[in-house]
Image (cartoon, rainbow, N blue to C red):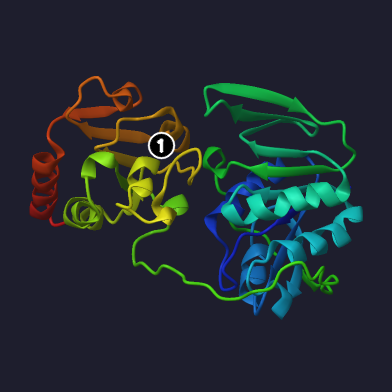
């Protein structure tokens, strides 16, 4: 049969997580169809149709899918599920909400945050904050899978799949949209940023993030992240959190400033290609995973680094 990949998108374009999840979906060995559910999402569907390896794109366009409510989307996926052996989605905050509902409605187990497809029924996934890798074999006839996209390469373009409209499923009526406050930033989104500068509890205040971390990030064209300790202390907003309970990232360059390197934080960034750590504690665990480490006072080192980047025209 076929694999259904549910796209992460903003109606106008696909998110990078979709391209990476497509690589995982293709590794299952079956043809892949993509579901794009949203409002005025034709542009995103057309983008999905251009991805290499996509057989067909299903477009569910309507007000019911305008605000990422989990229950209507789960109902839609279940209504389509009979045609598929596997249902795959990236392990983003959106689908961490949707996919468990899909699995429950189908009465199957969910295989969460896979990092490798061993066989169509066998997968690897991290456990214990990434300190062990679990091999999971599912006997369910229908697989429900979320993908840790930081470990998969993004699929490229080169396809020309047809786009087919599908009808909305019945609204379960379990939730309604009330409102939203969306943080806007000119910086790259964390999960797709090639460079990330993150600050920890040692930053001591929100003002210090603005004074030290953000100028460095702007010089590098980087996204801004934070440890959970910094977020819990109110130094940074929740959507900056990197780690086991935040966002899992794998940029080309990860700069950790004043982050000790608790196991929960390492789980969210240790797949980064190059890790640079700045910390005055030479015994900080972050240095065990860092490619480059600087034992220094961040309040002196970070402004000097920012200034040197400025001299280079950054």
Does residue 252 show up?
Answer: no
Does residue 283 show up?
Answer: yes
Q: Residue at x 56, y 73 (%)?
A: 12
Q: Residue at x 19, y 52 (%)?
A: 208
Q: Which residue is mark 1?
A: 272
Q: Residue at x 39, y 35 (%)?
A: 273
Q: Residue at x 70, y 80 (%)?
A: 63
Q: Residues within 10 Å of mark 1 (few under 14, many from 20)?
A: many
Residue 61 point in image, percent of width and height: 73, 76
Q: Residue furthest front?
A: 233
The image quadrant of residue 59 is bottom right
In the rendered picture of this protein, how many numbered marks are placed on residues?
Answer: 1
Residue 153 point in image, percent of width and height: 55, 43
The image quadrant of residue 7 is bottom right
In the image: residue 107, left or right of residue 159: right
Residue 188 point in image, percent of width and height: 38, 59
In which quadrant of the rendered image does the C terminus lie?
bottom left
Nearer to us in this view, 149 or 179: 179
The image quadrant of residue 51 is bottom right
With respect to residue 299, does 274 lie above or below?
above
Nearer to us in this view, 312 or 10: 10
**Could you say whether the residue bearing mark 1 is in a helix, strand or loop?**
loop
Residue 242 point in image, percent of width and height: 42, 44
């Amino acid at each position: 049969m076929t694999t259904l990949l549910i796209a992460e998108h903003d109606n106008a374009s696909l998110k990078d997580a979709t391209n990476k999840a497509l690589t995982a979906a293709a590794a299952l060995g079956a043809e892949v169809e993509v579901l794009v559910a949203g409002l005025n999402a034709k542009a995103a569907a057309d983008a999905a149709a251009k991805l290499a390896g996509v057989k067909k794109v299903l477009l569910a366009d309507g007000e019911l899918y305008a605000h990422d409510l989990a229950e209507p989307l789960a109902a839609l996926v279940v209504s389509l599920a009979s045609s598929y052996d596997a249902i795959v989605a990236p392990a983003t905050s959106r689908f961490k909400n949707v996919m468990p509902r899909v699995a429950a409605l189908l009465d199957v187990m969910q295989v969460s945050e896979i990092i490798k497809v061993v066989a169509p029924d066998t997968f690897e996934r991290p456990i214990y904050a990434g300190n062990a890798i679990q091999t999971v074999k599912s006997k369910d006839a229908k697989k429900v899978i979320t993908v840790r996209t930081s470990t998969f390469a993004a699929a490229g373009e080169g396809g020309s799949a047809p786009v087919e409209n599908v009808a909305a499923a019945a609204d379960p009526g379990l939730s309604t949209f009330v409102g939203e406050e969306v943080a806007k930033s000119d910086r790259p989104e964390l999960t797709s940023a090639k460079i990330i500068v993150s600050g920890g509890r040692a930053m001591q205040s929100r003002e210090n993030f603005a004074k030290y971390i953000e100028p460095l990030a702007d010089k590098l064209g980087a996204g801004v992240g934070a440890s959970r300790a910094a977020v819990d202390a109110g130094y940074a907003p929740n959507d900056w959190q990197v780690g086991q309970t935040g966002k899992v990232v794998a940029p080309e360059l990860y700069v950790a400033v004043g982050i000790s390197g608790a196991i929960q934080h390492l789980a969210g960034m240790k797949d980064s290609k190059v890790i640079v750590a700045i910390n005055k504690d030479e015994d900080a665990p972050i240095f065990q995973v860092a490619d480059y480490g600087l034992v220094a006072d961040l309040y002196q080192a970070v402004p000097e680094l920012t200034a040197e980047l400025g001299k280079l025209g950054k």
